[in-house]
Amino acid sequence: MRGARRPELVLPELRRWDGGELQPDGDYDGLEFLDEDFAGQEGIGARFMDCALRGCALDEAGLGSARVLDSVLEGVRGVGTNLSRASLRDVEVVDARLGGTQLHGATLERVVVRGGKIDYLNLRMATLKDVVFEGCVLVEPDFGNAELTRVEFRDCTLRRADFTGARMADVDLREAAELDIARGIERLAGAVISPGQLIHLAPAFAAQLGVRVEG
């Protein structure tokens, strides 16, 4: 089992964002966005490099195909944020409060999601490489047809997770605080679980195999 490589993130001295709306294909470098309201704004294809977004509202923000590089997202919040086909590399997401975030078709590499709660996270057909979910709560995350390589769930709560069609290599679920798989339990090949988790998941494995368990 190879562990995930974490981002080595050292931000430079940042300049405060001077306001205004996000722009499609905008180029943002070395900026701090503090308590900004980006609800409903369109930043499709934008690039964020060496940036910090702290306490920002991202409700219905359109950030499809955006690139977020060497950056921190701390305390961001919002419902329906669209990051489909986005690329996140060397990124820390800290204490986020998000719902219905769209990351389908996205690429996440050397990303840490620490703390916070994310409901209905859509990672269908996404590529996750060297990603750590740590101390966070994921409610009904959808990993359908995603590719997971060196992904760790540490002290992380997974509720009603969907792994339908997922492909896994070196996925570590042993330290998940709660592991509840709604669909796709047969796709856990390439993952490692603890003996206790095996006992908890035994009924689901039996059902997948068509085995009846009777007293």
Image (cartoon, rainbow, N blue to C red):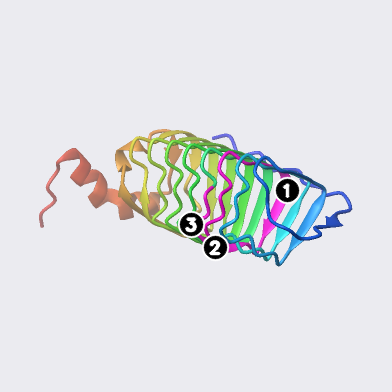
Looking at the picture, which amino acid does disc 1 mark? Ser
Q: Mark 1 touching mark 2, by CB under 8 A?
A: no
Quick check: can you spot residue 179? yes
Number of numbered labels in the structure image: 3
Q: What type is the residue that disc 2 sits on?
A: Gly
Can you identify the residue that label 1 sits on? 71
Distance from the alpha carbon under mark 3 to that under mark 2: 7 Å
Residue 67 on the magenta span:
yes
Residue 78's tag is 2
Q: Which mark is residue 144?
A: none
* Secondary structure state at the residue bearing disc 2: strand
The residue that appears at 56% across and 51% down in the rendered structure is 133
Asked if residue 72 is among those painted magenta in the image, a careful observer would answer yes
Along the line of sight, the residue nearer the viewer: 139 or 77: 77
| Amino acid carrying mark 3 in the image | Gly
Residue 48: horizontal and vertical position, in percent? 72, 45
Q: CB atoms at circles 3 and 2 under 8 Å apart? A: yes
Q: Depth-wise, is mark 1 or mark 3 nearer the camera? A: 3
The residue tagged 3 is 80
Q: In x, y percent, where is residue 202?
A: 27, 49
Question: Pointer 1: residues within 10 angstroms few (<14), some, or many (20+)?
Answer: many
- SS type, badge 3: loop
> Label 1 to label 2, Cα distance in Å?
18 Å
Give the residue displayed 40% in from the left and 47% down from the top.
Answer: 142
Task: Provide the secondary structure element on which disc 1 rests.
Answer: strand
Above/below status of 36 relative to 214? below
Asked whether residue 6 appears in the rendered view, the answer is no
Callout 3 crowding tier (Cα within 10 Å): few <14, some 14–19, many ≥20: some
Q: Magenta part of the protein: which range? A: 59-82
